[in-house]
């Protein structure tokens, strides 16, 4: 099962198959084995998510909960975890790997996560990748990823990667589910390197004709 034994923040972020939330058991299988789709699957109705998962991170844990319900939340503009990860990244770029690890580990060892520290043996580019991954997980769906991958100059790799998911099929006679990894979206060559910079607004250039447009947008 692809959803088992994951980082605990995964289940705080994503509602997936065979998971309990607010006392309800959620099943995301799309069809019985041998069938093309089931009654409530995306292929049948177009109503349910194509990923067979649901964003959980901002769902309220109390109050009305159905498709007709609207609710408001307090948006996390600036969390202490982001401050720590910003500091860790800055310290890494300045060559202070000890402090960088320390502040990433502050995020990982808090009570709600309780993950082991990144060991001192993780250094250099391996540590950089761990810092990048920590931001990806900790700050998921909080409007950081778009800017992070551009700042790190990895957008051409990340934004052109295939998006995959798992189609889930249920064998009703045995109760066993089969997870089939599928490509949801092939984005090859859709993101160009120049798009790492945004275009300068035309009205700004009209105010000052001396401003050159960023490359690729003329």
Image (spheres, grey):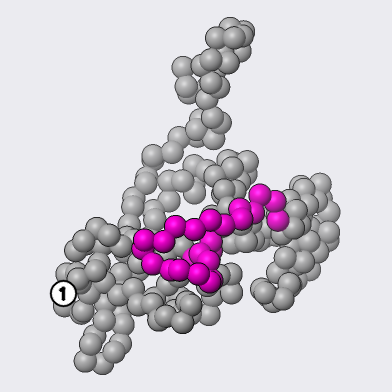
Residues in magenta, as a range: 56-79
Q: Reply above or below: 32 against 67.
A: below
* Left or right of 67 in this view: 58: right
Q: Residue, x 20% and y 72% (percent of image)?
A: 38
Quarter of image, res 51:
bottom left
Q: In the figure, is residue 12 to the left or right of 184?
A: right
Residue 195 visible? The answer is yes
Q: Position of residue 9 (x, y in %)?
A: 58, 69
Q: Quadrant of residue 7?
A: bottom right
Q: Residue at x 73, y 73 (%)?
A: 109
Task: Please check the rendered image and state whether residue 187 is part of the magenta-colored stretch, yes or no.
Answer: no
Residue 133: x %, y % from top left: 61, 59
Position of 206 relative to 1 (above/below):
above
Residue 87: percent from left, percent from top: 78, 52
161 over 174 or under it: above or below: above
- According to the picture, the residue beneath numbered tag 1 turns out to be 35
Furthest residue to the left?
Answer: 35
Q: Is residue 71 magenta?
A: yes
Seen from the viewer's position, the closer of residues 40 and 158 is 40
The kind of secondary structure the magenta stretch mainly shows is loop
Residue beneath the point at 49% across and 58% down? 71
Query: What SS does tag 1 mark?
Result: loop
């Amino acid at each position: 099962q692809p959803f088992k034994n994951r980082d605990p923040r995964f289940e705080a972020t994503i509602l997936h198959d065979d998971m309990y939330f607010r006392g309800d058991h959620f099943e995301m299988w799309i069809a019985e084995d041998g069938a093309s789709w089931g009654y409530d699957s995306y292929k049948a109705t177009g109503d349910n998510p194509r990923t067979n998962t649901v964003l959980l991170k901002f769902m309220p844990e109390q109050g009305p909960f159905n498709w007709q319900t609207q609710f408001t939340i307090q948006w996390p503009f600036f969390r202490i975890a982001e401050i720590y990860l910003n500091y860790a990244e800055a310290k890494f770029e300045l060559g202070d790997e000890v402090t960088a690890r320390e502040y990433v580990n502050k995020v990982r060892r808090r009570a709600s996560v309780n993950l082991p520290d990144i060991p001192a043996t993780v250094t250099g580019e391996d540590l950089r990748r761990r810092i990048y991954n920590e931001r990806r997980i900790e700050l998921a769906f909080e409007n950081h990823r778009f800017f992070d991958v551009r700042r790190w100059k990895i957008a051409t790799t990340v934004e052109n990667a295939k998006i995959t998911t798992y189609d889930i099929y249920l064998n009703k006679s045995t109760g066993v589910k089969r997870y089939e990894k599928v490509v949801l979206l092939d984005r090859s060559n859709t993101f160009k390197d120049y798009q790492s910079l945004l275009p300068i607004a035309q009205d700004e250039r009209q105010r000052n004709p001396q401003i050159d447009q960023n490359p690729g947008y003329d």
